[in-house]
Amino acid sequence: MTSLLLAGVNPLQSDRSLAYYLTLGGYESVKKALTMSPDAVIDEVKQSGLRGRGGAGFPTGTKWGFLDRQSDKPRYLVCNADESEPGTFKDRYLMEHIPHRLIEGMIVSAYALGVHTAFIYIRGELMWIKHQLDQAIAEATQAGWLGDRILGTDYHLRIVVHPGAGAYICGEESALLESLEGKRGNPRQKPPFPAVSGLYGCPTVINNVESLASVPWIVLNGGAAYRQLGTEQSAGTKLVSASGHINRPGVYEIEMGLPVEEFIYSDQYCGGIRAGRSLKAVVPGGSSVPVLPAHLALKTASGDVRRLSYESLADGGFVSGSMLGSGGFIVMDDTTCMVRNTWNFARFYHHESCGQCSPCREGTGWLEQVLHRLEHGHGTPHDVDLLVDITKKIEGNTICTFGDAASWPVASAVRHFRGEFEYHAYHPDRVRDRRHPIGLERMAS
Amino acid sequence: MPEFSPDRMTEVTQLIARYPDGRQKSALLPILHMAQQDFDGYLSTETMNYVASLLGIEPVEVYEVATFYTMFHLTPVGTYVLEICRTGPCALAGADDTLERLETILGIKEGETTPDGLFTIKTVECLASCASAPVVQVGERYINHVTPDCVPALLDDLQSGRVR
């Protein structure tokens, strides 16, 4: 296994100390970066082909290039550690086991961007990890990697860890900024983009934990070396959070381009489907991305091997493909009821909608209601098309992409498992009959 | 009227100083976490008014925030708030059954508190712990792999102070 982000991590006996991190060659990239010009650091990141690991996959170097450098206002770097996408727990794992790698990445990135105050916005539920990060920052400051006159240069930086308080929407970058300003997490209209007017109206770059933690390796080894890893359009390595009906759930660092089949069945990774059952469906990139039935998870519609990369997972568009998203890889076996699972996701989005835009506020509620009645044996055949109709009315009609994220799981589940939804609609009595109906038995009856 | 201890006030002052000048409102979420911890585990109107006065903002600015974020309790809760994740992977791992067992043993429904004031059951969304599903959060702790059969032991451990 290629190990860049998780090099030196031993989850069973985690050593978070600075002393241990230094034995791994920690903070070497800070030494190197400070001898380079900020633009040269940005160039390395641009050349590396690193794409945002939070879910959108936007090139990190390009995002940095948008930062308004003419403004005389202070600039900010904000690390998005509000990891809340169902099925995703890789940022938590990274911060929990090797916090200094994130801090190192933030120092180098902040230097490149001309930032002197940076924030880590971490979800409030992970309060113990916030304490660990505070501790790591204190250690790094004491050792001179942070604070005034870093390594004797004129460069100074401080990092503030800020806890959220339970709101999925704060993972959306403009909602995160609102929240960091002490307000409700309502996403902002864009433009202006945060690179021009972000935190406190100042130019701001917001990057995911994993993106920032990838920067030290890139700066130390060069963007070209990073680009050698992975595929043409998906450079480097990716943390994948594997959960659901598999033998070995956990966080795995993979080189981009690994076949999905190998990831699911190899003992190095997921170790196959639990209890010898068979694969039914995969949500490859967190609950927001389209679900794929087994055959489309392993191969694209044109018969190519499906791989863990931006381009391969997107192959086939929304008709037969999905997205890499956050790398929240949820596996479902043949006992899974797709209607029940889709209802679960729809309930999540209804609960988490910030309520700002009517199509999302109302639409997510309708999706939940219609799916609830289908799953509980009170649906009608008309409901299946109604679901699709509602998703089309939410999608694209909201300030942020939450509306799309709420629509895609429903639209894709109906597309690929329509028979199961219709079974619920046409046989409500049989559905009502079972307390916890499961897909396999229901389909066979 | 709630009031932070002198030690806590020092913490509050340091916390506010971490944000740029004039941006003290940024400290609202962390201070609300502290207030909830110190003042009976929930945010009463008095507590929210007190926090507003500390930050020099209007009470409504605190109310609108406190009501938005799910970690804040706006009504009294039990000593132990059992926050059970019910999203996606936890549901696939049987979180519904865990919830049902909790409700049966404690004799209360989700959102309610036991008459002795010890336990509150609350359902929450994805806690980013899907590899150890089903997960229950109690205070700052995550309890992993809480299958229905683990529920009696978990409650016992909490009650006897073995898990805090």
Image (cartoon, rainbow, N blue to C red):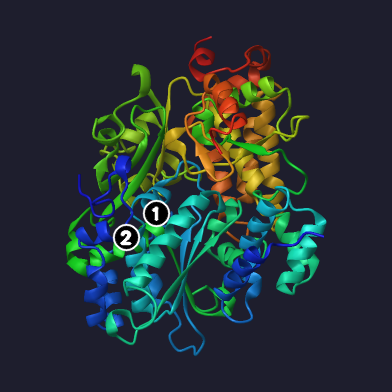
Amino acid type at image mark 2: Arg
Mark 1 residue crowding within 10 angstroms, few (<14) / some (14–19) / many (20+): many
Q: SS for tag 2?
A: helix
Of B115 and A247, which appears nearest the observer?
Answer: B115
Q: Name the image quarter holding the N terminus of chain A.
A: top left
**Mark carried by residue A95:** 1
Q: Position of residue A190 (x, y in %)?
A: 57, 70
Residue at 23 percent of width and 81 percent of height: A36
* For marks 1 and 2 on the same chain, the one whose residue lies earlier in the sequence: 1
Residue A187 shown left or right of residue B67 in the figure: left
Mark 2 residue crowding within 10 angstroms, few (<14) / some (14–19) / many (20+): many
Name the residue tied to disc 2.
Answer: A101
Q: Name the image quarter holding the C terminus of chain A.
A: top right
Of A167 and A17, which appears nearest the observer?
Answer: A17
Task: Tell me the chain of label 2.
Answer: A
Q: SS for tag 1?
A: helix
Q: Same chain for marks 1 and 2?
A: yes
